[in-house]
Amino acid sequence: MQVRHLLKDKGGSVVGIAPAASLADAAKLLTEKRIGAVVVREVDGPLLGILSERDLVKALAAHGAGALEQAVDRHLTRDVVTCGLGHTMEDLMNMMTRGRFRHVPVLDDDGRLCGVISIGDVVKNRIAETVREAEDLRVYISATA
C-alpha cells in the first residue's frame, strides 16, 4: 500500500505548533490530541522540524522543569526524514527502523506538507494486511478441499 492510499483512509490533518511556542504548550497539545509528535511550522508555512515526546524528555533531562518555558525551536528535530505519496508501507517501516523514529511527515508532489504517518498507522496497516491474507488463504483452502 502506498502512503497516498493510507492518507486517503486516515485523512491528511496535520497537528502543528509554532516554533516560538513553549515546550509546555507543546506538551499540552500532545496530551490533548493524544499524539506522540507535532510538526513545527508557522501557520501554513514550510516544515521547520518535528517535536516528539522524546525531544521533550531530552529537554527536561538537560534543563529541568525550566525547559517547559523554553521555545519549541530550541529543542525540535530539524533534520526530519520525510516521505512522498508514492512511498510504500515497507519503505516507511525501513525508514523508521533505520532512523529509530516513529513519525514521518508526508510531502505532496509540490513539496507541501500533506500528512503525518506514525508507526501506529504502519502497524495497523500491516495487521490489516495480515488478517486479509489469512482470510484469503482460508477461502482458498476451503475452495480446494
Image (tube, grey):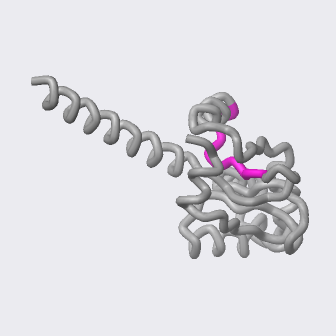
- Number of marks present in the image shown: 0
Q: Residue 77 location in percent, x, y?
A: 80, 49
Between 47 and 76, which is closer to the camera in this rendering?
A: 47
Q: Which residues are magenta?
A: 99-107
Q: At 66% from the left edge and 63% from the top edge, which residue is drawn?
A: 12
Residue 108, percent from left and from top: 79, 53
In the orientation shown, which residue stands out farthest toward the left? 145
Residue 118: percent from left, percent from top: 59, 51
Q: Residue at x 69, y 47 (%)?
A: 104
Q: Quadrant of the C terminus?
A: top left
Quadrant of the frame with the N terminus: top right
Residue 137: x percent and y percent? 25, 30
Q: Quadrant of residue 22?
A: bottom right
User: Which image quadrant for residue 27?
Assistant: bottom right
Q: Is residue 95 left or right of residue 50?
A: left
Q: Is residue 145 visible?
A: yes
Task: Identify the residue at image location x=26%, y=38%.
Answer: 135
Q: Is residue 106 magenta?
A: yes
